[in-house]
Image (cartoon, rainbow, N blue to C red):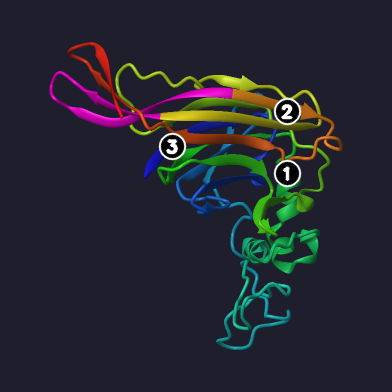
Amino acid sequence: KLRINFDITFPALQCSIISVDVMDISGQEHLDVKHDVFKQRIDAHGNVIATKQDAVGGMKVEKPLQHHGGRLEHNETYCGSCYGAQESPEQCCNSCEDVREAYRKKGWGVSNPDSIDQCKSEGFLQTIKDEEGEGCNIYGILEINKVAGNFHFAPGKSFQQSNVHVHDLLPFQKDSFNLSHKINKLSFGEPFPGVINPLDGAQWIQHSSYGMAQYFVKVVPTVYSHLNEQIILSNQFSVTEHYRSGDSGRVQALPGVFFFYDLSPIKVSRSRSAMCHSYTS
């Protein structure tokens, strides 16, 4: 596996609407990744408001509701409706996130969260409204296959529809999303002395209603050996950048920050004692 370490700040995009997706050329997809992903709500001055492990959609429903509404009988367990998206009659959707996930698997979008009891109980739309004007610092670790692919940060819950990757933006009731961002840190693998990560500190400001940032990364496997015979297997990378912005009605593409990565067939060896580089294929 290849480890990606990331720390990115979105000063004008609230935490509740950002999702992280990973996909590669082998066909593997990890949508709306939450494991080892953390978000910090920040105010307009960049000060941290709150930190949480990612869980877009909030907590589980605490108020008991029956499958079709009403009061629970004695010893009866709660089984929330999936609103037509259930895969079996026994499937329960006990949270807003469960319903959104069931819809995602069907390739459907949730057009009105207030029509879903679970979302209404959790205050899904209210959470988005409460975070209006905030930004988000998102950081963590991704473990990916050692093949070409991409990972991206984008608004909305993602799903596949007719073999097309789609993000559901309807629940957020917004016409535009500000993808301005600063890459505080981005690296592939373990750190080692002298490594330079070219995107650390890079930032982009979106000046229009629509924005997409694309980073094309070439990852070079690197073996670092120290005087004390310590060996670190890691990576270096080079990058080219491309930005698109304009009126959202004219540019038909998903707003987001995308990292397209590929692995070089060349391996680099770095030795601290010899202070030289050698290359092997």
Q: Position of residue 145 (x, y in %)?
A: 42, 46
What residue is at 56 percent from the left and 34 percent from the top? 259
* Foreground disc of the pair 3, 1: 3
Give the CA distance from mark 3 to mark 1: 31 Å
Residue 137 in sight: no
Which quadrant would residue 281 be assigned to in this image?
top left
Give the CA distance from mark 2 to mark 3: 25 Å
What residue is at 72 percent from the left and 56 percent from the top? 123
**Three-letter amino acid code at the position of disc 2:** Arg
- Above/below status of 36 relative to 103: above
- Residue wearing tag 3: 4
What residue is at 25 percent from the left and 30 percent from the top? 232
Question: Is 135 displayed left or right of 55 in the figure?
Answer: right
SS assignment at label 1: helix
- Residue wearing tag 1: 130
Mark 2 or 3, nearer chain start = 3
Q: Which SS does the magenta portion mostly show?
A: strand
Question: Is 237 displayed left or right of 45 in the figure?
Answer: left
Task: Tell me if mark 3 has few (under 14), some (14-19) or many (20+) residues whose alpha carbon lies within 10 angstroms of its own.
Answer: some
Residue placed farthest to the right in the image?
A: 249
Q: Position of residue 158 (x, y in %)?
A: 65, 52
- Residue wearing tag 2: 244
Magenta highlight on residue 227: yes
SS assignment at label 2: strand
Question: Is 192 displayed left or right of 231 in the figure?
Answer: right
Residue placed farthest to the left in the image?
A: 228
Mark 3 or 1, nearer chain start = 3
Q: Range of the magenta residues?
A: 220-240
